[in-house]
Image (spheres, rainbow, N blue to C red):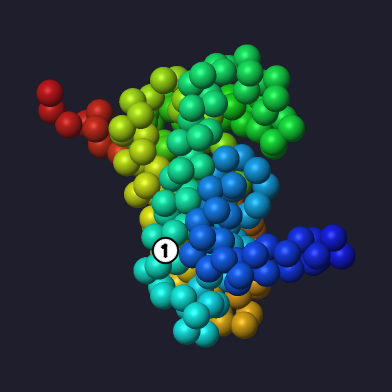
Amino acid sequence: MTEWLDRFLFQVVEAIAAWGYWGVGIGMAIESANIPLPSEIILPFGGFLVSQGLLTFWGVVLAGTVGGTAGSVFSYLIGSWGGRLLVERYGPYFGVSREKLAWADRWFATYGEATVFFTRLVPVIRTFISLPAGISRMHLGRFVVYSFLGSLLWSIALTYVGLLLGENWHQIKPWFHRLDAVIVALLVCAGLSWWWHSRRRPK
């Protein structure tokens, strides 16, 4: 890890340690609003604080879920208000390229609105899926429900791993990024299996 990343990591964990649940929630909201602040740092550190008795497990999970959902709604509104032209013009400044938008379009076309739920469980991709959901004018109520449920599972998983790792919580980040391709492949296989069986059902 480079020196500037070390400093960045230190500042993030210092803020979370000082602000507690608010730090977790605000950090997750920032990440879900397409600003590069990885949840693989926020939630595992929250789990570490749980292991030290400074926070509660479900308190960290709830803060992470609510914060992630709030940031997702913010991104959704940007996509809904600004449309594709705005996102294509300014998205690259926040890591949202046209290639990523095209990928999201294909997922929406294949799996429908459930894409919002499944992609909440995929590192990196989970942070920008709200924009195409807004662009497509997905029903806001269903978007919030899918985002909340996906963020809940993600928060539970990363907080629990941080709790188990304790002082070694930071070791989770590189492993999650290495698993990106595996997670995507499993989701694609699950989606294809569902599509195949749905076609075989008698009408």
- Residue at point 73%, 64% (across, down): 11
Q: From the top left corner, tell me how far across and down residue 100 is, in percent.
A: 62, 31
User: Between 115 and 144, which is closer to the camera in this rendering?
Assistant: 144
Q: Quadrant of the C terminus?
A: top left
**How many circles with numbers are drawn on the protein?**
1
- Residue at point 56%, 18% (across, down): 82
Q: Name, please, the residue furthest toward the right.
A: 3
Q: From the top left corner, tell me how far across and down residue 153 is, in percent.
A: 39, 57
Q: Is residue 119 visible?
A: no
Q: From the top left corner, tell me how far across and down residue 196 is, in percent.
A: 31, 34
Q: Is residue 143 rendered to the left or right of residue 135?
A: left
- The amino acid type of the residue labelled 1 equals Val
Q: Residues within 10 Å of mark 1 (few under 14, many from 20)?
A: many
> Relative to 195, is 59 above or below?
below
Q: Name, please, the residue furthest toward the front.
A: 19
SS for callout 1: helix
Can you tell which quarter of the image residue 6 is in?
A: bottom right
- Residue at point 47%, 57% (across, down): 64
Q: Is residue 12 visible?
A: yes
Q: Name, please, the residue furthest toward the left.
A: 203
Q: Is residue 116 rendered to the left or right of residue 31?
A: left
User: Between 74 and 136, which is closer to the camera in this rendering?
Assistant: 74
Q: From the top left corner, tell me how far across and down residue 103 is, in percent.
A: 56, 30
- Residue at point 57%, 66% (across, down): 19
Q: Quadrant of the N terminus?
A: bottom right
> Relative to 127, is 159 above or below?
below
> Relative to 111, is 168 above or below?
below
Reading the image, the residue beneath label 1 is 61
